[in-house]
Amino acid sequence: MEATRVRVESVIEWALAAVCIVAALAVGSLVVREARTVGAVGTRVIAREAVAPAPPAPAAVPPRAVSVPVLLLPDGKAVRVGESLSEVAARLGRQAEAGAQAVERAPNGERLTRFYEHEGSRFVLVFEPFERDAEPRVAAIYLQ
């Protein structure tokens, strides 16, 4: 009877071990499946955002010029879109202007296109008033 009792206990132990292994594999499978799948996001996904079209370059700007929002010059000076004409003129001076400026009609006044050469850098600044009767500001910077 003692031998039968030992065999029954070992069968029960093996059965409990098998149940624990199966349970561990099931939990592991669930974890791996959840890690591999991506849940739905609560926000809408927009395939293409609406971007305002860039305004056309003034006629005086060379065709291969590249538009940049900030121009860092070799001497440490910088020109940014939105700065006023008087700020830029005071910083760069009249000696940096190269060539004649072009004047065009813009919605809020006159658009000035000026060519500059400063410390070996050649660039074009487009000034136009952002509001009616306001001081012209840098609307675009083009590198040549």
Image: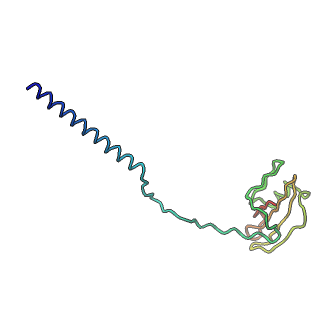
Q: Residue 10, located in which quarter of the rendered image?
A: top left
Q: Camera-side residue: 20 or 99? A: 20
Image point (16%, 30%), residue name: 9
Q: Report the side of 7 relative to 143 (left or right).
A: left
Q: Give the quarter of the figure containing the C terminus.
A: bottom right
Furthest residue in direction left, as rendered: 1
Q: Position of residue 104 (x, y in %)?
A: 81, 73
Image point (71%, 69%), residue name: 55
Q: Position of residue 49 (x, y in %)?
A: 57, 65
Q: Give the quarter of the figure containing the N terminus.
A: top left
Q: Position of residue 85 (x, y in %)?
A: 81, 61
Image point (31%, 40%), residue name: 24
Q: Camera-side residue: 107 or 18? A: 18
Q: Report the side of 95 relative to 52 (left or right).
A: right
Q: Position of residue 42 (x, y in %)?
A: 44, 58
Image point (92%, 57%), residue name: 95
Q: Residue 106, located in which quarter of the rendered image?
A: bottom right
